[in-house]
Amino acid sequence: MFAHVRRATIGHVKIENTHPFIGTDANGRDWTLVHNGTFFESDVLLPCADIQEGETDSERLLLYILDRNEGITDEKERFELMDSIVSDLSAGNKLNILVFDGENLYVHKNEAGTMYQK
């Protein structure tokens, strides 16, 4: 079970902006994401704004993860990709996340080298 208390800093208080965000990647894998923090610099997430239902940077992050996971089926590759995404997006941003890919839980706090998989 994921629980998340949200203080709306990006997007209005409404159901479409409520965590957790859930989506399915091109491989049919279901993902769940909760995020605390704010993306101040995140040009790579901007294309996801056109397809998201709500207004949050967190939902854009999940959509970006889903897009980047296309064709990746190996557990090790998924972890490496998640670590890469978090490393790339952490600079200048506040990124604390819990992500579940239906099989593995990924945890990252806003500090270099803190991506964990269980």
Image (tube, grey):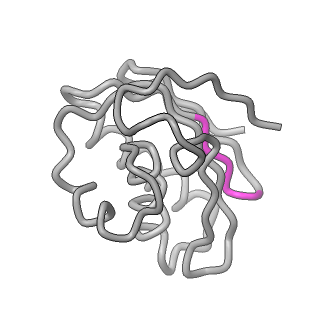
**Place of residue 41 in the rendered image (x, y in percent of width and height, measured from the top left):** 17, 37
Q: Residue furthest right?
A: 1
Q: Main secondary structure of the magenta part?
A: strand
**Place of residue 91 in the rendered image (x, y in percent of width and height, measured from the top left):** 21, 30
Provide the residue span drawn in magenta.
Answer: 98-102
Front residue of this view, candidates 102 and 62:
62
Q: Is residue 15 left or right of residue 112?
A: right
> Where 30 sits versus 76, above or below?
below
> Where 30 sits versus 42, above or below?
below
Look at the image and tell me in which quarter the N terminus lies: top right
Look at 34% across and 34% down and name the residue there: 10
Look at the image and tell me in which quarter the C terminus lies: top right
Look at 55% across and 25% down and name the residue there: 6
Quadrant position of residue 51: bottom left
Residue 88, magenta (yes or no): no
**Place of residue 66 in the rendered image (x, y in percent of width and height, measured from the top left):** 49, 66
Front residue of this view, candidates 54 and 2:
54
Look at 69% across and 42% down and name the residue there: 105
Front residue of this view, candidates 96 and 87:
96
Q: Is residue 4 left or right of residue 102?
A: left
